[in-house]
Structure formats: C-alpha cells, structure tokens
Image: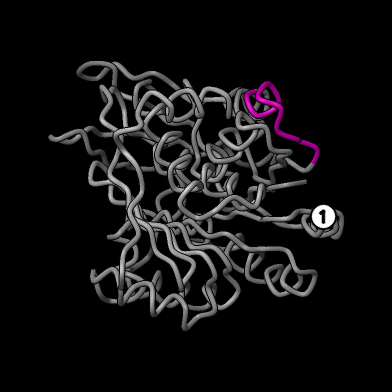
Amino acid sequence: MDVICIGEIVVDFIPMNNFTYKACFGGAPMNCAIACAHLGLKVGAIAAVGNDAFGKFLIDTLASHKVDITHMKRISNTRTTLAFVVKLPGGEREFFFYRKPWSLSADTELEFTDSDIEYLRQARIVHLSGFALSQEPSRSEILKILPKLRAHNVLISLDPTFRIDVWDSEKEAKRTYSNVLKYVDILLATLREHSLLFETSDVSKCIRRAKEYGIKIIGIKMGEKGAILSNGSKTFSMKAYKVPVRDTVGAGDAWNAGVLYGLVKGLPLNHSLKIANAVAAIKCMHVGAITGLPTIEEVKKFIEHHKETSPEELNL
C-alpha cells in the first residue's frame, strides 16, 4: 500500500437550507483516503462503523472509490458516528457530534488485531487523525501501534483535526498530541492547530518546534489565505487558487492527499504544494467532502490553467 488511513469514519449531515440536511460520507482520514485513491495511489483504510445502514453506506462508499476495505470493522453493539455541520458567516463551519463524550458510537471503539498491524507495516505512509485520539479505547490502541510502525520504517502522517467538542478538555488534547508527535514524520495541520500544539502562531517558530520533535514534513493550512509546506530546510508558501467556493468541508483532507501524493511520488516540495492546493480548490467547488475529488490528470490540467498562482520560497 502507498497510504493506509486510520481513525474516524462518520456520516456528515450537510445543511442544504434551513434545517434540511443531506447525509454525506465523512471522517477526515477517510476523506483523505478517497482523495488519495482518486489521485491514483494504492490506498487502504482501518476504521469502525456500526452494524447499521449508515455503516454499510460508509464502507460501500470506500469500496466504490477503490479504497481497500478488508480491514474495516463493523461493531454490532454500537451505532455509526454522526456529525452535523453548521455553516458560519464567511464560508467557515463548525461541527457537533453524536459520539463520545456525548454518546457511544462506533469510531471510538476501534481496536487493532495482529493482522491489522501486519497490514499497516506494508504501507509506505500511515495517515491518522487526532480526532481518533480524543477518546478511549481508540486512543490507547493507536498509541500502542505507533512505535511498532516506526520500527518498520513506516512514515506516520498526522492531521490533528482538533474539535474541542469531542475532547474532555483542551489540556487533555495537548497532552495526547504531545505523546503522539514524537512518532510523527509528517504533520499536516491548520495554523490554529499549530498554535495549539506549539503555543505560537508564528510560522517560523511552529516549523522550528516541529523539527525539534523530529518531524520531517510540516504543512500549515490557512484556508483562503493558502498554505505553507516545509521540510525544515526549505519552506514554500502558496496562495489559495481563486475558485467559486461552494463548500469547504473536506478541503483540508483533500489538501493532505495532495501532499501525501507528492511524498509517495518523490516530487519536489514546491510541486507537492501546488498539487495539494489544486486538489483542495477543486474540492471546494463541490458540496460534500468527497464530491468532485480530482484525478491527477485533472489536477495537472487545473494547474496548467492557473499558472498565475505558484509557490514562493520563504526565508525563515
């Protein structure tokens, strides 16, 4: 496998108008899995759903997008996790969840078998979400496998996906993230999440502190302001492509997929950033986290038609 994504999988309820909602596929690492598969990578997933219609919908969706589902879990005594999206002024959004600590649902009950661990060891990159670290038993299960993957030279990618609604406290989130960061090779986070992790919103300080943990690739997502990608020695910044935005849900996950594609293919850092911004921009022109996700050929055509936007190297 090029990439195996682990963590939460949920049904996103997207507001269409007033209180009319559309049920859509969701869960940050699984959105990223589908985006990676669209780009042509060989992708697998490990996550837990309930033994219900929503769970079947989520697993069937993964399979229909050519993500390997042989290690997906169906937990009979739980319901599939639900997330409701609330749109805010300016195009941003927030979420509220039907899962721990509010109610029991499947994604927090993820546990890994020996077979799962052997499967994960075959990946070049394992991508995980900090959301999945917010509750037990999934938190301890993930922490248990990280040193085993590191010992087999599997690269660990983390998207913190910080949502205070699913944590018992911000203090607990910081402590948990700190425990995980020492195993992380690739950190793909929003500027707000970097501020939470490193207690600064200064980009150069965030990159320096990430390097102190041994993190090799640092991504900083800044929404409509664009993004930054660094390997510690070289750092590139790029404005967001100007497109008609219909929905930003899943844009960060799409961006992550572009970065992971570049790493798997061994592309230069600035080219990876250009691809990541393009994948995110194309997603934003569609409603739903996985609707409209592009192939790599579509990404190349998009970039060709938007030559006016390109990465710039920063001297930090």
User: The C terminus is located in which quarter?
Assistant: bottom left
Give the residue at the far bottom of this rendering: 212
Q: Residue at x 48, y 23 (%)?
A: 301
State yes or no: residue 55 in magenta.
no
In this rendering, the answer to whether 213 lies above or below 280 is: below
Give the residue at the far left of this rendering: 89
Q: Position of residue 138 (x, y in %)?
A: 60, 59
Q: Position of residue 200 (x, y in %)?
A: 25, 74
Q: Is residue 260 left or right of residue 209?
A: right
Tally of marks: 1
In this rendering, the answer to whether 192 lies above or below 240 is: below
Question: Which segment did they paint magenta?
Answer: 61-70
Q: Position of residue 282 (x, y in %)?
A: 40, 26
Quarter assignment of residue 65: top right
Q: Nearer the viewer, residue 167 or 175?
A: 175
Q: Amino acid at mark 1?
A: Gln
Q: In the structure shown, which secondary structural element does the residue marked by tag 1 occupy?
A: loop
Q: Residue at x 73, y 47 (%)?
A: 2
Q: Position of residue 25 (x, y in %)?
A: 51, 28
Quarter assignment of residue 205: bottom left
The chief SS type of the magenta part is: loop
Q: Is residue 254 left or right of residue 2?
A: left
Q: Residue at x 24, y 41 (%)?
A: 224
Q: Is residue 65 left or right of residue 180?
A: right
Q: Is residue 78 left or right of residue 67?
A: left
Residue that badge 1 annotates:
122
